[in-house]
Image (tube, grey):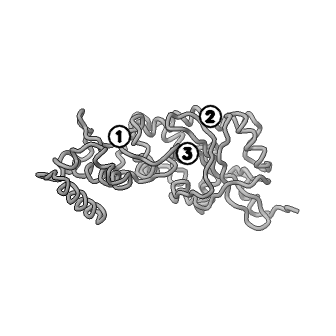
Amino acid sequence: MHPSMQFFERAVLLKSRKEGGERASFHQGLCGEGPSFFLSFGAGFAALLAELCLEREVEAGTPGASPPPDRPWFWRGSVDRPHKWDKFYFVHHWPVTVCKMNDNDCKDPLMYWTIHGLWPDKEEECNRTWHFNISELKDLMGDMEQYWPDVIHPNNTHFWKHEWEKHGTCAAELESLNSEKKYFNKALELYKKLDLNSYLLKLGIKPGSTYYQMAAIREALTKVYDVTPKIQCLPPEEGQLQIIGQIKFCFTKEFELRNCTESKAYSFSAHKDKFFKTEDLSNCNDTLTYYPSHITWKHFVANTVNLS
């Protein structure tokens, strides 16, 4: 058990005894209390206790078992569990840029935008006891391989595992996403609903040797979707242009599109993802931008661009 868990268990037991609530056991006693009791410690500790109680519940039964009909409030997906996040980022990434950022000359990188993830905006790794189970996705495998592939290691499922354990376990705090299948299926549904690849083509924005003004791309997408997405680029090296890498759309918890606004005073690591080294990406400037194809990339990197 994590040291912070041990400390918190002792603290909770002490508080309960002071309030006259002697418990025969931690699991049967404190974990049977309602959310209002746990929230008396503050939302942060309440979430920590929820994870501890879930850990005890799993240890007492079968790991990975589904919650019983009368599940306690701390069970995964419970609508009563406190959470801090406000919106989702639905993240597309451009495979050619991803390959080059990871020093990988992908033989034939995909030439369409694929899914990077569906991310709650302020939390990650919300339940480390809820491990990824590939068998939960057996009915989705066709779409997963086509629209949500690991562009670096196409035959590997580690990417999905990473996305589930880092982001999915937080999204699962909503009843509508409280299973692996629901989480991944909703992301696939949003991908198809947004239909980014088709709209870019209709707007005449295509990968290749043409350079685009980022302001024009952002304005065009805003007109199509009636919200402003967040577009991220690989910053330019000296004498070169920024390179488009990711496009993020924001959704409410009810899966309605909303503007991607963010306080400048607030930053959270979930906005970046080290799995594909996307921490190197930053918000695009409203300047010339390169949208590479696998054919034009080598020409681009071999020739500096005169920006004067």
SS at badge 2: loop
- Gap in angstroms between the C-alphas marked 1 and 2: 34 Å
Residue 166 lies left or right of residue 7; in this view the side is right
Q: Position of residue 202 (x, y in %)?
A: 73, 33
Upstream in sequence: badge 1 or badge 3? 1
Q: Position of residue 235 (x, y in %)?
A: 70, 61
Q: Which residue: 49% across, 41% down? A: 145
Q: Which residue: 32% across, 51% down? A: 40
The residue most toward the right is 308
Upstream in sequence: badge 1 or badge 2? 1
Residue marked by disc 2: 195
Q: Is residue 38 or residue 210 the one in the foreground? A: 38
- Name the image quarter holding the N terminus: bottom left
Residue 262 lies left or right of residue 38; in this view the side is right
Residue marked by disc 1: 80
User: What's the residue type where badge 1 is placed?
Assistant: Asp
Q: Tell me if label 2 and label 3 are in contact, CB under 8 Å.
A: no
- Gap in angstroms between the C-alphas marked 2 and 3: 16 Å
* Number of other residues with Cα within 10 Å of mark 3, as a class: few under 14, some 14 to 19, many 20 or more: many
* Number of other residues with Cα within 10 Å of mark 2, as a class: few under 14, some 14 to 19, many 20 or more: few
User: What's the residue type where badge 3 is placed?
Assistant: Tyr
Of tags 1 and 2, the one toward the viewer is 1
Residue marked by disc 3: 89
SS at badge 3: strand
Q: Which residue: 48% across, 40% down? A: 144
